[in-house]
Image: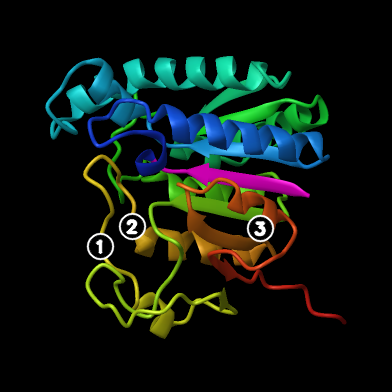
Amino acid sequence: MRIVVKVGTSTLAHPTGRLNIRHVEELVKVLSDLKNAGHQLILVSSGAIGMGVGKLNLPGRPADMPTKQAAAAVGQCELMYTYDRLFAQYSHTVAQILLNAGDIQEPHRRANVENSLGRLLELGALPVVNENDAVGTDEIGVSTTIGENDTLSAIVAQLAHADLLVILSDIEGLYTADPHRDPEARLIPVVEEVTPEIEALAGGTGSALASGGMATKLKAAKLAAQVGCDMVIANGKRPQALYDIAQGRPAGTRFLGKKPSNP
């Protein structure tokens, strides 16, 4: 299969912004094993701003845009250095792709991104994609930005004609209620369609260093479904769940893509 895996800041970094070495090493090992099994993988990785916060010894995620951009520029170097070093241990080559909204919205540039992703996969590389936050404004709703990486991962899944999108988060999946507040909350294993009732289950944003929440993941599920791509939300603290997900076994919450109707 061609699989897009999105990993969030809460999986990659400690609350301090410093790299969570154990989690990242486990993730890279599993992804490398899946590549060895014949799957084509694209990694959409958050974490640049968070890692820049740690690298620059800032007290927390900055509020002003220039400092966000500076943190992203520093953190992106650290992020790619880490991926390059860890994947090389398993003889896999990574490639960096940084995108802004214009690369998606303008047809010619969008075709260039699609061609680049396709050729990298043909050559056996593992593209690592992120929004170019060093020059972007990192604000949801601004026309020159994508906003957050849940949406970006769904767009990448569309461009790459992926079979599956997996969003690794700090939660097991979609619940009937907030599991942090309601002990009766139950995990929803399969969602056939993102209805208004499903959207009503979305809460707020996640960790202090992250920018997404369940609402952005449901938006990603709807985008993926448009091209018949299933999407799974699973806990990034257990990268081994990717084995089950790739084989179609129950793990997290699976959102079913819309299959083309027979004429």
Q: Report the disc number at residue 213.
A: 2
Occupied quadrant, residue 121: top right
Q: The C terminus is located in which quarter?
A: bottom right
Choose between 16 and 47: the one closer to the eye: 16
* Residue 243 appears in the rendering: yes
Q: Position of residue 28 (x, y in %)?
A: 59, 31
Q: CA distance from mark 3 to mark 1?
A: 26 Å
Viewed as shown, does residue 44 lie left or right of 17?
A: right
| Secondary structure state at the residue bearing disc 2 | loop
Q: Nearer the viewer, mark 3 or mark 1?
A: 3
Which residue has dot 1 on it?
204
N-term-proximal mark, 3 vs 1:
1
* Tag 1–tag 2 contact (CB < 8 Å): yes
Task: Give the residue type at disc 2.
Answer: Gly
Residue, far right: 263
* Residue 131 appears in the rendering: no
Other residues around mark 2 within 10 Å, as few (<14) / some (14–19) / many (≥20): some
Q: Report the disc number at residue 245.
A: 3
| Secondary structure state at the residue bearing disc 1 | loop
Taking the spot 36% from the left edge, 26% from the top edge, the residue there is 19
N-term-proximal mark, 1 vs 2:
1
Task: Give the residue type at disc 3.
Answer: Ile
Looking at the magenta stretch, what is its main secondary structure?
A: strand
Q: Report the disc number at residue 11.
A: none
